[in-house]
Structure formats: structure tokens, C-alpha cells
Image: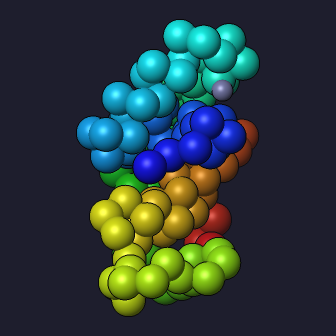
């Protein structure tokens, strides 16, 4: 069961369709009564769309460099205590999201550099 105070924390996961169906349904109802969350979801979706567009501007050479670097990116452990009965391997998107976020931020940073040339050894 999701408390009403907890619903305010689900904007990011809702914006990228990462909630379980029951959570998404509860949050959808919450959006109708919470303008702050509704605005945050709109802004997060706009940002996610911009990030998705930025990825398409990455050169094939840079993409290959990122893919080669992925095994070297350490995944951070989850914050806070693990809930009772939670798998050691984590849930679904929680396992790969940190690595994808690092790779996307590197790709976005490289694509914004003047000249667009990646730096060797980064
Ligand atoms: Zn809210």
C-alpha cells in the first residue's frame, strides 16, 4: 500500500513508466489532485525526451567507445537498508539504471563538447 506522502516521491519513476501497474494507477489518481506532481511529471518527461534525442546525435565512434567502457563502470549499491525479502540482485530497472545514467551523461557531455571529438582514455 502506498501512503499519500509517498506518492509525491514517485514522479520520476512515473515519468519514465517504471512503476508497477498498481503504483501507476494510484499515482495517476494522485496527479489529478496534485498540481505540483503533475508539473514535475511534465518537466521530467520533457527532460527524458531531450535526453533521448541527445543520444541519437552520438557518433558511431563515440557510441563504440561508450560500449567498450561500460564494463569499467561500477554500479553503486542501493541506498538505505534492503527491505525484508528483497532479492540480492535487486529489482528490474534499479539494477541497470545507474550504469545507463553514467553512460548517458558521458555521451551527452561528449556530444556537447566543441568539435564533438571524444577524448582518448576517458
Ligand atoms: Zn503530489
Vertically, is 97 above or below 53?
below
Furthest-left residue in view? Answer: 21
- Residue closer to the observer: 102 or 27: 27
- Residue closer to the observer: 94 or 46: 94
| Left or right: where 20 falls relative to 84 | left
Quadrant where the image shows the C terminus: bottom right
Is residue 113 visible from the viewing direction of this image?
A: yes
Vertically, is 10 above or below 66?
above
Location of residue 3 in the rendering, given as x and y in whole percent from the top left corner: 58, 44
Location of residue 26 in the rendering, given as x and y in whole percent from the top left corner: 42, 31
At x 45%, y 83%, the residue is 84
Location of residue 34 in the rendering, given as x and y in whole percent from the top left corner: 65, 16
Vertically, is 86 above or below 42?
below
**Residue 112, quarter of picture:** top right
- Which quadrant contains ligand 1? top right
Is residue 66 visible from the viewing direction of this image?
A: no
At x 52%, y 66%, the residue is 98
- Residue closer to the observer: 11 or 26: 26
- Residue closer to the observer: 25 or 47: 25
| Left or right: where 103 falls relative to 6 | left
At x 72%, y 18%, the residue is 36
Vertically, is 73 above or below 17?
below
At x 47%, y 29%, the residue is 27
Amino acid at each position: 500500500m502506498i501512503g499519500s506522502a509517498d506518492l509525491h516521491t514517485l514522479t520520476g519513476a512515473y515519468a519514465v513508466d517504471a512503476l508497477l501497474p498498481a503504483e501507476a494507477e494510484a499515482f495517476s489518481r494522485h496527479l489529478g489532485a496534485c498540481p505540483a506532481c503533475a508539473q514535475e511529471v511534465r518537466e521530467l518527461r520533457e527532460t527524458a525526451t531531450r535526453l533521448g534525442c541527445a543520444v541519437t546525435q552520438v557518433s558511431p565512434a563515440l557510441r563504440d567507445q561508450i560500449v567498450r567502457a561500460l564494463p569499467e563502470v561500477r554500479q553503486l549499491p542501493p541506498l538505505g537498508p534492503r527491505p525484508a525479502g528483497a532479492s540480492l540482485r535487486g529489482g528490474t530497472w534499479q539494477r541497470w539504471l545507474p550504469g545507463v545514467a553514467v553512460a548517458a551523461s558521458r555521451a551527452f557531455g561528449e556530444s556537447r563538447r566543441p568539435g564533438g571529438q571524444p577524448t582518448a582514455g576517458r
